[in-house]
Image (spheres, helix red, strand yellow):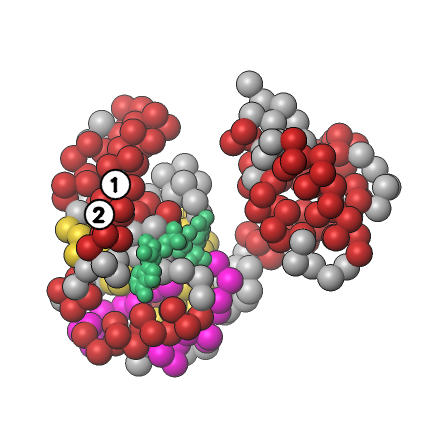
Amino acid sequence: MSRITKVTVLGMGVLGSQIAFQSAFRGKEVTAYDISDEAVAAGRAKLDALVERYQQDLGDAAAQAGEVPARIRATSDLAEAVSGADLVIEAVPEKLEIKTSTYEKLAAVADASTIFASNSSTLLPSDIAPSTGRPDRFLALHFANEIWKRNTAEVMPGPETDSEVLAEVAAFAEEIGMVPIVLKKEKAGYVLNSLLVPLLNAAGELLAGGYADVETVDRTWRLGTGAPMGPFQIFDVVGLTTAYNIAVTKEEPVQQEFAAILKRDYLDQGKLGIASGEGFYTYR
Ligand code: NAD
């Protein structure tokens, strides 16, 4: 059992609302914070909308989900939001300046014992730690979108994170229904994206370089490794808009060609992946 019972989530966006909901759903005392009353109201609407998604996806297990939004306190007052918190989970926009200024304000009002965790996908704990005022009680806690279904939580220490804090946060993740994936030290991409990104890049290059078609690449991966899905099936899950946004920023000509294929043959045709019913494959 962790000693973490009071949790504050900073940012009530896509991930922050899900983290707040999941923590409250699993019995934690949750406060959510956002920058203005308007942002808090928008966050509240996201919490309300999650009830149906939990019920649809989890069935009977989500019988209590309807009671969750009312149990979450929400405020635009940072000091009030973090007062007495055991753990603050930060899910503000993925920009270093925003993270840094958020932690500077947070450090000024939080109790000395409060643990800070960042849900950042691409920044490392060492990028942010100096602004926290407590690098030993700071680490990354990275959830996946649709937290109630994709229930991994990557727990990653920075160079100065106390090992007891790492263990405490991993135990908390388990208590809210996650499978903790604990890293020994910081690494861009954590575990999952360190594996997945090179696979997806290579698949895009096989296609764009004219070496193999979509079905051949996927069949090879499934048969050769026993994996249930090939990389283009995974692209359909991730969404082809995201795939395009990543490929288009890369310098290699083959990645530029892959971006062009994604735009011409898929995005411009309204084929966005599973979400639109069609991507590399067609879904009912
Ligand atoms: P989002 O844009 O949906 O939400 C960000 C929220 O932060 C908004 O509600 C915004 O009002 C609020 N905000 C803006 N400035 C703020 C400030 N100074 N202080 C407090 N709140 C502020 O973003 P998101 O997709 O939820 O991403 C948040 C974090 O989660 C990022 O670090 C991102 O890397 C990470 N993440 C996102 C996903 C994803 O699939 N969206 C998955 C894993 C991790």
Residue under the image location 63 percent in, 23 percent down = 282
Secondary structure at badge 1 equals helix
Amino acid tagged 1: Ala
Which quadrant holds the N terminus? bottom left
Judging by the rendered image, the residue that carries numbered circle 2 is: 41
Q: Are marks 2 and 1 in contact (CB under 8 Å)?
A: yes
Q: Position of residue 278 (x, y in %)?
A: 61, 27
Judging by the rendered image, the residue that carries numbered circle 1 is: 45
Q: Nearer the viewer, residue 114 or 171?
A: 114
Q: Position of residue 59 (x, y in %)?
A: 31, 24
Q: Is residue 221 left or right of residue 210?
A: left
Amino acid tagged 2: Ala
Q: Is residue 276 left or right of residue 43?
A: right
Residue under the image location 60 percent in, 57 percent down = 194
- The total number of labels drawn is 2
Q: Is residue 217 above or below residue 9?
A: above
Q: Which residues are magenta?
A: 110-131
Residue under the image location 41 percent in, 64 percent down = 140
Q: Nearer the viewer, residue 283 or 233?
A: 283
Q: Is residue 152 left or right of residue 23?
A: right
